Structures are given as structure tokens and as C-alpha cells.
Amino acid sequence: MSLTLEQVKRIAHLARIEISDDEALTTQGHLNGIFQLIEEMQAVDTRGVEPMAHAQDVSQRLRDDAVTEGDRRAAYLAVAPDTEAGLYLVPKVIE
Amino acid sequence: MINKSLKQLAQALAAKQISSVELSTLFLDRIERLNPTLNAFVTVDREKSLKMALAADARIAAGTAGPLTGIPIAQKDIFCAEGWTTTCGSKMLANFVSPYDATVIRKMHNEAGLVSLGKTNMDEFAMGSSNETSFFGPVRNPWDTSRVPGGSSGGSAAAVAARLAPAATGTDTGGSIRQPAALCNLTGLKPTYGVVSRYGMIAFASSLDQGGPMAASAEDCALLLNTMVGFDERDSTSLDRPVEDYTRDLEKPLNGLRIGLPKEFFGEGCDAEVMAAVRAAIAEYEKLGATTVEVSLPNSHLSVPAYYVIAPAEASSNLSRFDGARYGYRAPEYDNLEQMYEKSRAQGFGSEVKRRIMIGAYVLSHGYYDAYYLQAQRIRRLIADDFVEAFKSCDVIMGPTSPSTAFKLGEKAADPVQMYLSDIYTIAVNLAGLPGMSIPCGFVGGLPVGLQLIGNYFAEGQLLNVAHRYQQATDWHQRRASGAE
């Protein structure tokens, strides 16, 4: 398998990473090298093998539906790039 | 004082031969003198450290100290610590002052009373095997400052090897504790997945990430591990199991220990002199009463390919939180929300991190999920099953930690695939979720070699015992680097 330049740009967009034409070209070379390494997997017959998502096969715990965290709103807003009136500020999304 | 073990430091503190403030000052002064050469620390805050040391001295005076209260350590900069800049080696978080403590930080400092000497340099978001992907520049190996310390916990490794700290924490997703421990002549332990809480440990690949200790000896690691483990409801994969004392079995004799030697770890691909040091270590174990048996991990050659699907897939999901809106870097100029995301991420992440996010985005995308992600998860099962089979005929598995000694800065930086192959012996352990260690076992051309020990699930106590007995019979772990002095 080999990624085209267009595919590289599409993946960058999917990942929300701006990429220049020059960067896309270098990235194409690197990604294709990595996918060549990954390709070794494809020859393995894994029919009937249960996919392993986690090292320990434990199910997710349930807990009581109760508030356990205190109000840290000010502390968390303090590390944001831009806030106003207690809200995160981003460019306008609704005209 | 700087070369003392944690046990000796604890005794000196208890006997009032030295105060925690004096001890911490000693190490802070060394950091000030030697860090410009090594770049092992990215954040040092003398005032904060000494405040913690004062509090520790008060606990010692009041008789409420724990076994390690007052001992200074270094924290990998992947652990969020309230009021401390927590960067994860990235421009994305260069100005992020954490508003909360990771569970590991809370347990080690607030509960056990250890003093933090600061935050150590690391590969950006723990993605790397040489510490060269850090936004804050590479770390240098104290054994030879023209060489890498390994990664991603390279700052922690260099700090302990140069005695800028008596011990440190690391995290290990594919070898990031064990490989730098091997390259810097340290003892490092990656616990069974789920034993150390991941809460507040900035996520790379959540099903693989695990924190652990890095120190001069197995005994030091056991003492540190005692302060790090425990069930945590804030980590959904934390395991609820009885608390152990990891120093309990340190002295047990090794008579009858069955060492499994995977034939796949003793074939081609490893430097011949590194292999000779590993074989000599195994011969030493036979003198200590152990026997060896050949085992096989037939799918181990698939661990690097499977890892480079699973880890990037999880990373692309985890790192989607860095959007320039709630915390971290935001690009100075953009016209709309999408541009804000794309420019903030393009400018805030380094190239290795972007590569892995893009691999992840691709293998999870429509039409490729089954061929890559699901196939990798099935291979992960095969790799884990190989270990289950191998442990039927042995108690512990041994082999090299890294296929070579520390390489030169820049040597592998241009070729991601060559860099990925540095972790060829460590990655399978993370995929299976097993505990693994690296211990010093010799030198090649003045550079340290690590012996990897792999245990069955929850066999940390046994691994530490196996490592400790070897360290009583050898002195490799006591050799000190002088390259930075």
C-alpha cells in the first residue's frame, strides 16, 4: 500500500492539522515507510481470533449517580486561551 | 550523600543526620550546575521544592513520617502537578500550569511526603525513543553526552544516572521506562497494566500507558512502587486489588527459579556485544540457582507493526482534546473555528506527534478500520497468548532490553522506522499488559547494557526479587556516570 499526496492531505484534514504542500510531501515519505512496516500484519491469518482491546479483560465499573467533584470552574477557566463571562471564547460559528 | 540508596537516605533523615531541606538543596544545587549540560529537567522551582522539604521535616520531627518522607525525587513532565507547569515535552502545553494533581503526584508527595525536585524532559507526548522529539530540546546521556539517553522518559533517566535526583518516575507505553533505564544504567519497572493510576498522567495510548519507578536499584524501585500503586476510582481501568509490600520478597533465594529464554529474542537483530553481556547475566543467574528453558514467542515479530497501529489510533483520539479552545496553545491568527483548530494543532505539535496522529486518523477511518485496527487488535491477542503459553514452563522471561547501547544524537532522528525498531524487545510486554523491568548487566565500549526481565501478571514482587538478588551478586548498577561532571 502506498498513500498518494492527496490522501495525505485528506488525512491531515481529518486530523485537523494544517499541512503545507512541502510538509505533505515529506509526510508522505514517512507515512509510507511506516505503513510498509505495518503491512507485515496483513499476511497473518487471524480468523476466529477475538480482538483484544485491553490488557485486562475487566468490564467498566458502575458507580452511584452522585456528585463527587467540587466546583473548580474558575481554576479550569484560568488555563484557557480566551474566556469571557465564565465561558470559553472561540470564533463565531453561528451567523 | 548523592550516591546513597533510598533506604540509606531514609535512615539518614530518620537519624537527623541531614534534614530534607539540606538534602533537597544538595540535589537542587547539582541540578543548577549540571542541567545546562544534560537538559534533563524542563521545570525546576526551588521555592516550591523547599516548601515541600520543610513540610517533610515537620512530619519527621512530629513522628508522622512515612518510609520515604523527605526524600527528593524527579517527576516526568507527563504527570499533572497542581501549580507546576506541565508540558509533556510539547509546545502545545508549554505554558500549561496544571490546575490539579495526578493521582501519582498526590500519592507520592501529599501522602508519602516525597519532595519534588521538578519536572523532567521527555519526548513530546511520550512519542519517541531518544528524547529528541521534545520541544525543549534533546536530553544528553550522562555516560556520553554526544549520545541519547533513550526515551521517552529520557530526562528522568539522565537525571538519576547523573545523580541530579536519587530516583524518578517514568511512564512506559512501548518501552519508555525500560529502554532509557537500559541506556543510562538504571533499574526501571513498568508495572502490570492497571496497577498504577493513569489519572492526571497525560494520555498517549490509554490501553498501553503505565507509570512506574526509575532508580539505581531494585530495592529503590520497590520502595517507590509502594508509594505509587493502588486502586483509583478516577481511572476507569485501575484494578481493585489488595495492596502489596513490594519489598516483601526482595531477599528470597532464587533456587529453582525457571528463566524462560525466548528464542526470538536471541536471534538476529541485536548487537553481538550487547547479546554477550545479556548471556553473561543469565550465566550469573544460573550461579544463583536458577535454571533456563527455551521458550517461544512466535508472534513477537508482529509486535512493532501491531503497536504502530494501536498506539497511534489511541493517540489520535486522545490528542483530539488539544483544540486551542480550553487549554494549551492557540494560534495567534485564524479566520474561523476550523482554522483555529488546524493552525493551533499544526503549530503546537511537533512532527513525530503529527505523524502518529495522522497514522491513527487513517487506520480508524472508514474502510480501513477492519484491515488495520481490528487486525492489530487480533494480533495483540496472539502476542498476549504467546506469553500465557510461555509462562507455563517458566517463572520469568529474560532477554535484551534494547538491541543496541545508546546511539548518537541525530543518528536515527531522520528515519522514524529505524527509531521505532529501538523498542523491538519491549513493545510486546505493553501489548500483553505484563510487568517488565530493565536492570544494568554490563558495558560495551563504556556504555551501559540492560537486561530485560518480564514477569507474569502482578508478578512485580517476584521481578523485584529476581533483580535484587542479581544486584547483590554484581555491581553494574553501582557504576556511576561522570560524563556531565
Image (tube, rainbow, N blue to C red):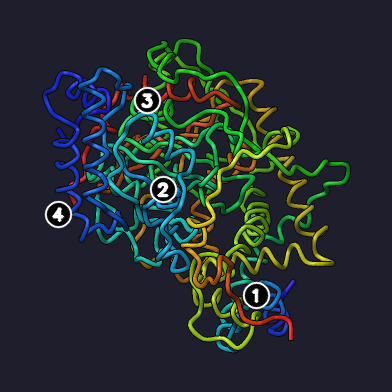
> What kind of residue is marked 4?
Arg
Label 1 and label 3 in one chain: no
Chain of the residue where label 2 is placed in the rendered structure? B
Pick the quarter of the image with the N terminus of chain B: top left
Label 4 to label 2: alpha-carbon separation: 25 Å
Tell me: A53 left or right of B460: right
> What kind of residue is marked 1?
Arg
> Judging from the image, what secondary structure is the residue with disc 1 in?
loop
Tell me: B135 left or right of A49: left
Q: Looking at the image, which is closer to me, B197 or B367?
A: B197
**Residue assigned mark 3:** B223
| Vertical order, B154 against B286 (above or below) | below
> What kind of residue is marked 2?
Ala
**Residue assigned mark 2:** B81
Residue at x-position 39% and y-position 39%: B450
Q: Specify the quadrant of the image occupied by residue B251.
A: top left
Crowd tier of the residue under label 2, counting other residues whose Cα lies within 10 Å: few below 14, some 14–19, many 20 or above: many
| Vertical order, B237 against B466 (above or below) | below
| Vertical order, B160 against B35 (above or below) | above
**Residue assigned mark 1:** A16
**Residue assigned mark 4:** B33
Give the mark toward the camera: 3 or 2: 2
